[in-house]
């Protein structure tokens, strides 16, 4: 949830002009949406703690609620889109092509995103096995996006990602999020959904977008008995 600067000022008990000054002088994190500046509740809380600025309890409560408010994965994938026949013959080539298809705000530097995705892969492959990888930046706040999204990229050619099972990757779920708590929550949600055998089969066989989205929604809702068995949940 994005907070207008006037509300951010009330949380920190300072005038709005002080907030605007701190943006420049003390690196207070803000996001620009439709030519207006907003703060993220979690980022504002963390910044206040790190900078010794007293913050109201209501800001903490807002930040805690925000951390729990992550849209369903099916909604996140609708935002990010399903992109087919993404080209590339190497991990680096694929990542560059992937960055090119992501529906990012115009202020996000695509070359910078490519660089941080490559740096993340250098620390350890995001290939989770069975031909699937989840590329993401190590520090999501670096991108300063207003809302999270997940883009599914189905590759034209399977590519070696150094995955844990050594299988080449054919499907990437690219995660972009505005905060660390949202980032971790979405990663956990992806890990849950991608354990479903039927969803993995649909990805492997390049099924229709409608079939893939329907399966993601079904696993999320727990309406499929085989999905429940797959993830070890009681029926």
Image (cartoon, helix red, strand yellow):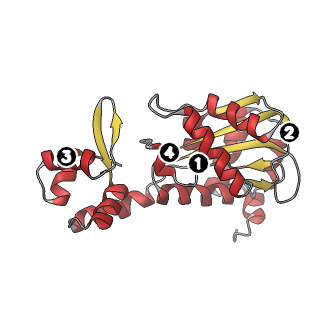
Q: Which mark is residue 21?
A: 3
Q: Label 1: state its secondary structure.
A: helix
Tell me which residue sits at (69%, 50%) in the image.
134
Q: Earlier in the sequence, mark 4 or mark 1?
A: 1
Q: Quadrant of residue 59?
A: bottom left
Q: Quadrant of residue 191?
A: bottom right
Decide: marks 4, 3 in contact (CB < 8 A)?
no
Could you classify mark 3 by the number of other residues whose Cα lies within 10 Å: few (under 14), some (14-19), or many (20 or more)?
Answer: few
Q: Earlier in the sequence, mark 2 or mark 3?
A: 3
Could you classify mark 1 by the number of other residues whose Cα lies within 10 Å: few (under 14), some (14-19), or many (20 or more)?
Answer: many
Label 1, label 2: how far apart the Cα atoms are: 24 Å
**Which mark's residue is nearer the viewer, 1 or 2?**
2
In the displayed structure image, the side of residue 84 where residue 174 appears, left or right? left
Q: Name the residue that disc number 1 marks.
A: 73
Tell me which residue sits at (58%, 50%) in the image.
137
Residue 128 coordinates in the image, percent (x, y): 76, 56
Q: Which mark is residue 228?
A: none
Q: Name the residue that disc number 2 marks.
A: 158
Label 2, label 4: how far apart the Cα atoms are: 27 Å
Of residues 89 and 174, the one nearer the viewer is 89
**Which mark's residue is nearer the viewer, 1 or 3?**
3
**Which mark's residue is nearer the viewer, 2 or 3?**
3
Q: Name the residue that disc number 4 marks.
A: 148
Q: Earlier in the sequence, mark 2 or mark 4?
A: 4
Residue 41 coordinates in the image, percent (x, y): 33, 55
Label 4, label 1: how far apart the Cα atoms are: 10 Å
Q: Label 4: state its secondary structure.
A: loop
Give the farthest residue toward the front.
Answer: 25
Of residues 235 and 131, the one nearer the viewer is 131
């Amino acid at each position: 949830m994005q907070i207008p600067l006037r509300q951010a000022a009330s949380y920190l008990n300072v005038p709005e002009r002080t907030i605007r000054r701190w943006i420049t002088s003390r690196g207070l994190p803000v996001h620009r949406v439709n030519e207006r500046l907003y703060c993220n509740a979690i980022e504002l809380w963390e910044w206040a703690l790190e900078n010794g600025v007293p913050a109201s309890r209501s800001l903490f409560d807002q930040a805690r609620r925000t951390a729990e408010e992550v849209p369903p994965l099916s909604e996140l994938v609708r935002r990010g889109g399903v992109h087919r026949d993404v080209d590339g013959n190497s991990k680096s080539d694929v990542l560059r092509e992937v960055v090119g298809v992501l529906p990012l705000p115009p202020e996000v530097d695509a070359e910078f995103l490519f660089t941080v995705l490559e740096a993340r892969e250098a620390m350890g492959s995001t290939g989770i096995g069975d031909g699937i990888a989840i590329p993401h930046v190590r520090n999501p706040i670096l991108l300063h996006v207003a809302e999270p999204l997940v883009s599914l990229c189905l590759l034209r050619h399977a590519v070696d990602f150094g995955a844990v099972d050594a299988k080449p990757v054919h499907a990437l779920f690219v995660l972009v999020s505005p905060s660390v708590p949202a980032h971790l929550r979405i990663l956990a949600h992806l890990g849950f959904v991608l354990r479903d055998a039927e969803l993995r089969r649909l990805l492997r066989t390049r099924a229709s977008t409608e079939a893939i989205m329907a399966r993601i929604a079904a696993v999320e809702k727990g309406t499929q008995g085989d999905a429940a068995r797959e993830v070890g949940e009681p029926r």
